[in-house]
Image (tube, rainbow, N blue to C red):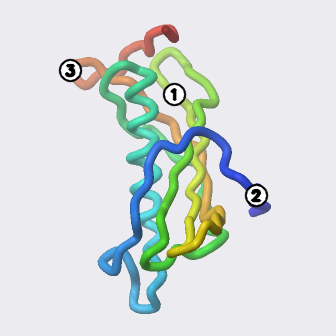
């Protein structure tokens, strides 16, 4: 993965990696990072859809750098496109190293979110405001 030097998209979520999120070597579980990316995608897509959304798919994800306990995970999102009921997002996960301004890309992926109505069925995403 050829990582850019600066994040792309809008900062959507920040959280600190804690000991309970790590394996015995002190590396943060990849599943924890992916869960935070999913949360950020849901936040951004729900704002765009003006309502409930669910994750429909995630494209391939590879981890370029480890996260360590104490690092701040910064998730950046960018809406790539809107279909009839779906929203496609580019999502980047960056580690701000503990007690440092250094930022390194950990991973990135494409997420597809689907807007749902009150009955849990796909519903059209409204036009932009």
The structure residue drawn at horizontal position 53% and vertical position 42%, both measured from the top left corner, is 111
- The reply, left or right, for residue 89 in relation to residue 123 is right
Q: Nearer the viewer, mark 1 or mark 2?
A: 2
* Residue density around tag 3, few if under 14, some if 14–19, many if 20 or more, within 10 Å: few
Where residue 13 appears, x then y in whole percent? 44, 48
Real-space Cα separation, disc 1 to disc 2, in angstroms: 26 Å
The structure residue drawn at horizontal position 59% and vertical position 51%, both measured from the top left corner, is 92
Residue 55's place in the image compared with 67, above or below, is above
Residue farthest toward the bottom in the current orientation of the protein: 25
- The reply, left or right, for residue 77 in relation to residue 113 is right
Q: Secondary structure at mark 1?
A: strand
Real-space Cα separation, disc 2 to disc 3, in angstroms: 43 Å
Tag 1 near tag 2, CB within 8 Å? no
Tag 1 near tag 3, CB within 8 Å? no
Q: Check disc 2 and report the residue beneath it.
A: 5
* Residue density around tag 2, few if under 14, some if 14–19, many if 20 or more, within 10 Å: few
Quarter of the image where one finds residue 107: bottom right
Q: Check disc 1 and report the residue beneath it.
A: 87
Q: Secondary structure at mark 2?
A: loop
Q: Earlier in the sequence, mark 2 or mark 3?
A: 2
Quarter of the image where one finds residue 95: bottom right
Q: Check disc 3 and report the residue beneath it.
A: 119
Q: Secondary structure at mark 3?
A: loop
Residue 129's place in the image compared with 57, above or below, is above
Real-space Cα separation, disc 1 to disc 3, in angstroms: 19 Å
The structure residue drawn at horizontal position 59% and vertical position 36%, both measured from the top left corner, is 78
In the image, 76 versus 82, the foreground residue is: 76
Where residue 91 appears, x then y in whole percent? 57, 46
Q: Earlier in the sequence, mark 1 or mark 2?
A: 2
- The reply, left or right, for residue 70 in relation to residue 65 is left
The structure residue drawn at horizontal position 51% and vertical position 56%, both measured from the top left corner, is 74
* Residue density around tag 1, few if under 14, some if 14–19, many if 20 or more, within 10 Å: many
């Amino acid at each position: 993965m050829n990582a850019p030097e600066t994040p792309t998209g809008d900062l959507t979520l920040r959280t600190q990696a804690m000991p309970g999120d790590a394996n015995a070597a002190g590396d943060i579980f990849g599943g924890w990072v992916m869960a935070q990316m999913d949360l950020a995608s849901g936040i951004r897509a729900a704002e765009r859809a003006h309502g409930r959304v669910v994750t429909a798919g995630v494209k391939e994800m590879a981890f370029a750098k480890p996260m360590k306990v104490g690092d701040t995970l910064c998730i950046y999102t960018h809406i790539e496109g809107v279909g009839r009921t779906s929203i496609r997002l580019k999502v980047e996960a960056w580690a701000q190293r503990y007690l440092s301004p250094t930022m390194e890309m950990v991973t990135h992926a494409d997420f597809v979110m689907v807007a749902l109505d009150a009955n849990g069925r796909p519903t059209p995403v409204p036009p932009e405001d």
